[in-house]
Image: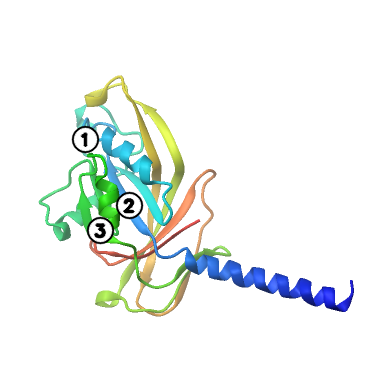
Amino acid sequence: MPRASKFIALSSLGALALAASLGAAAAQPLSVVELFTSQGCSSCPPANANLIKVKDQPGVLALSFNVTYWDYLGWKDTFGRQEFTQRQVSYEPPLGHDGPFTPQVVVNGHADVVGAAPGEIEQLISATGKTGGPSLSLEGGKVAIGAGAAPGGKADVWLVRYAKGVVQVPVARGENTGRTLPHANVVHALEKLGSWTGDATSYALPAAASGLSTAVLVQSPGGGPILAAATN
């Protein structure tokens, strides 16, 4: 290869690397939309359908957390986990609620709506805006969080594993007997990786189970606002 061509090729590679780096940074911020739902709740299917409508919008990270407190009605939610129920419970005092209910949509950890009426979720996304905290990236098998201000001095770092797309779930008992319910971006696992105190830091990113996508949330403790979010 002639010297000039070599230089052009190397320059192109450098430009691509820079573009990739800038692209990763430009992926932030996001609107994190969490739907708390249950297969045993007859009021939930409209909210499930509304989440499907927004899940592919640019700049939106939509997640379905299935809770467990309706299992007693006769159908054990196939995606329900106690830690998802606890996540919702932690949101209620800051949001001004006495206890959890379904459906409930929480955007960026600090604004909520039932989410069952047409356009409700879109309106809340528009009114709430996007996260504006530290830089956050998932690359090279690690989570990298940039320096910034940590409200209250500390934030939690959450690892979320979810199945991207829509899955249909037939329900054989309970309030939704005989119905097949669609669920979007179903969360299968939630784990606290550690804390962020305002200094640049990183965590090892464990490999995800087959078929699952990864999201990481940096969030004020106790059901507080989500400061930053990233997904692969």
Q: Could you tell which of marks 3 and 1 lies nearer the N-terminus?
A: 1
Q: What percent of the width, then of the height, locates residue 159?
A: 41, 57
Q: In x, y percent, where is residue 147? A: 41, 79
The amino acid type found where label 3 is placed reads Ala
- Seen in the picture, residue 183 relative to 55 is either above or below; the reply is above
Q: Which element type, helix, strand or loop, lies under badge 2?
A: strand
Q: Looking at the image, which is closer to me, 173 or 49?
A: 49
| Mark 1, residue position | 70
Q: CA distance from mark 1 to mark 2?
A: 22 Å
The circle drawn on residue 127 is 3
The residue located at (50%, 56%) in the rendering is: 232
Which color scheme did the rendering employ for the protein?
rainbow
* Residue nearest the observer in this picture, 140 or 3: 3
Q: Can you see residue 45?
A: yes
Q: Are marks 2 and 3 in contact (CB under 8 Å)?
A: no
What's the residue type where badge 1 is placed?
Answer: Trp
- Which residue position holds label 2? 33
What is the secondary structure assignment of the residue under circle 1? loop
**Seen in the image, is 217 located left or right of residue 125?**
right
Does label 1 or label 2 sit earlier along the sequence?
2
In space, the residues marked 2 and 3 are separated at their CA atoms by: 13 Å
Residue 17, quarter of picture: bottom right
Q: Position of residue 93 (x, y in %)?
A: 14, 58
> Would residue 142 be seen by someone viewing this image from the given angle?
no
Question: Which residue sits at x=27%, y=75%?
Answer: 151
The image shows residue 104, relative to residue 153, as above or below, that is above
Classify mark 2: residues with Cα within 10 Å, few (<14), some (14-19) or many (20+). Answer: many
